[in-house]
Amino acid sequence: MALLPSVLLRHPRLALAGLPIILGLDAAKSALHAALTDAFEEHRKAEKRADSRLARVVAYDLAQAAQLTAAGSLELARERWGEVALQAQAEERCKHVINALRNWIGWLYWQDVLHPSIEVGIAWLLEAGHVGVSEIWLYSRVIEDSIDTLLTRSRAEAQLASVRRNSVELVALHAAVAEAQAAARVRCSFGDEHGGDTSATVRVRCEFTRGASRVVVGSGGESVELRPSVYALFGPNGSGKSSLLALLSSCARGGALPAGLALAGECDVQLRLSADDIVEVTQRLYCPLSCQPVRWLAPSAHRNTSLAPLAARAAALLTELHFWSRRDDGAAAGGGTEGGEGRREEEESLAAELMAEHEDYCGALSGGQRAKLELVRSVLLRPVCPRLLLLDEFFAPLSAWSKALVAGRLRAACPDSVVVVVYHPDSMPEAGEGEAADALCDLAGGAFFDAFMEVRDGKLLPPKPCQAAARIDSEAQAK
């Protein structure tokens, strides 16, 4: 810099001739660099949004892991994680391409404009005798070696930190896998028809614990047997009702038990059905984030096909259940609108809503609406009702009229299934036999259950038939 004034004084024409060219090239380079920087920042922000969305979806699904597994939505979760991750990766690739182009333009500017100018200037200084050759070489070599050493050390430290972090994560993952493999599993056996009988049958003999609860199912070597019927399962809070349902549904996952549920002895579950015929609806219903609702509703076999017909069918079923009904007393036919035209409009609107992607669709729904949505997903959209359907306090968020409506649809859809419903009756009768037991079998003022079971004093009592259901069956046979 000290030599710059003297150079300008000795060669003013050369400076005036070269200055506009240098300024023009620099301005063009700066404008292009600014445009690329704007594009780079846009893609960087989009990448951050996609990463944030992926982290939110993954954290939500991990927090809802038990409900996600029970709902059989692991494949959907995997697909959604992949889609959001691909979006983040696409933005990252665009960001890196733009950054590489920006760096290449900067390099080109230095290589073809500035460096030649510097070399010409140094050559002139050498020719004029202001600087010696040995001094320039030594000065340049020291700077280059220092920069290379610092960058190499920095890169090595970053790589070493990444290796350490990955090693810690692998050790934790290995421990988690080993713990899961060492955990006791339910011994589930799936059988075919016996003696020409193809009806669904479940036989359970097990002893398990969860927290402070310890439950024995079956005693004296005898199993508790369940045949196609609707069973009410009741007992005090914390007695192990939900744990029993989780134990039965574990047979759909190879007998792997959820966290907190442990076996206290041998556990045998014999089922005359397949693992795909087991469906559990937990108390906390799972609903994915950042997803089209119809994709979650769709059975796995239909997720690669057109979803529009499925959305239309789901909308029709939800309208029949008065999903958006403003009146919950059955007075408003067609889901809260009058006439067939109003119902068609509601179905079309609901189908479009199911096809659109929502950040948190179920977050805006009431408990009753989520229960109806789960009923459509788990039962009504399937070709046939699951042969073993486990409902954990499913009717709790529904109003009295909605309970009657949903109960009717369940009985009509699942006549050949074993349906177990964790249920808290409004009042407990003094006796558990005869007419007094009808209080345990009523749902919203009508007979819904065929039999009831009670968890009492750490034991699951054998099923007892509902008298009202028996009378209805006998009257139906008489007619």
Image (tube, grey):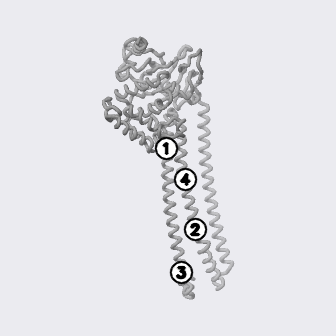
Q: Residues within 10 Å of mark 4 (few under 14, many from 20)?
A: some
Q: Tell me which amino acid carries mark 3.
A: Leu
Please report whichever mark, 2 or 3, sits nearer to the chain's N-terminal start. Answer: 3
Relative placement, left or right, of 433 versus 143 is left
Please report whichever mark, 1 or 2, sits nearer to the chain's N-terminal start. Answer: 1
Residue position marked by numbered label 2 in the rendering:
105
Could you tell me which secondary element the residue under label 3 belongs to? Answer: helix
The answer to whether residue 432 shows anywhere in this view is no
Please report whichever mark, 4 or 3, sits nearer to the chain's N-terminal start. Answer: 3
The answer to which quarter of the image holds residue 341 is top left
Q: Tell me which amino acid carries mark 4.
A: Ala
Please report whichever mark, 4 or 2, sits nearer to the chain's N-terminal start. Answer: 4
Residue position marked by numbered label 4 in the rendering:
90
Q: Tell me which amino acid carries mark 2.
A: Ile
The residue mark sitting in front, 4 or 1, is 4
Please state which of residues 345 and 125 is positioned toward the viewer in this rendering: 345
Please report whichever mark, 4 or 1, sits nearer to the chain's N-terminal start. Answer: 1
Residue contact between numbered discs 4 and 3, judged by CB atoms under 8 Å: no
